[in-house]
Amino acid sequence: MRIKSSWFKAGKEHTPEELAGALSFVIYRIADNALKNTRKAKFEIAVGPQYFAFLTEFLLFQIQVADRIAYRLFSLEERNSFTSELAHRVAATHAENESRLIGGDIAECKRRFIDRLNQRADEYADFTYEGKGGDFSFMRYLAFCMEQVMDDKDSWWIIDPMMSIEAPEAVEMLEKTFSNLLETAPRPARRRTGTSGD
């Protein structure tokens, strides 16, 4: 999956809130891609509540990853501003999509997402995230959460693809995107490959 992870105008530092806004879009694309990959792998995820439950868990996992990266890079105040903005941006997008596709009040959908995020934040707090990746338990907890989302026939089988494919790929993309968004040096100009009309 290709993701645009650089600013249109380079050479400027961005606030934690601006970084959160840019990353929220990427996080949603990664979650959507993980869902598509899981369905392609013949796991049944019904359109409706199960579809959004899958997206919710994957989004919550990524917010935890982004918060751990922010812990490594930002001051406490900056980290709090970043994570709060990221959570609200992702929650707003998710609530709008859920309300539009399966109904329900947008504000209530957002409130449910934030409530679940707070619950998961407490649970993921038990696991470490060192270097540029979560430990085994961090990935395993996402798989555990996904077990609860899947039907009985798929619940056991979802563990391996989550731990060995989807979670590590999401972490890698988030680390790379975060690094690119923090880059302030101007990018080299692209070389033109087309021919002129002379």
Image (cartoon, grey):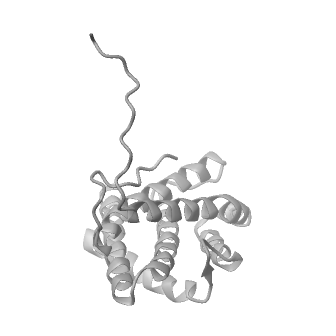
Could you say where residue 132 lies in the image, as x and y percent from the top left? 60, 71
Lateral position of residue 37 relative to residue 22, left or right: right
Residue at (64% x, 53% y) in the render: 43
Using the image, determine if residue 83 lies above or below residue 98: below
Question: Do we see residue 181 in this rendering?
Answer: yes
Q: In this figure, what is the number of numbered marks?
A: 0
Could you say where residue 135 lies in the image, as x and y percent from the top left? 67, 77
Among the 4 quarters of the image, the one containing residue 151: bottom right
Farthest residue toward the top?
198
Q: Quadrant of the C terminus?
A: top left
Residue at (60% x, 59% y) in the render: 169
Nearest the camera: 158 or 163?
163
Could you say where residue 61 lies in the image, as x and y percent from the top left? 52, 72
Lateral position of residue 6 relative to residue 128, left or right: left
Nearest the camera: 49 or 1?
1
Question: Do we see residue 98 in this rendering?
Answer: no
Residue at (32% x, 55% y) in the render: 7
Could you say where residue 186 lies in the image, as x and y percent from the top left? 34, 53
Residue at (58% x, 61% y) in the render: 172
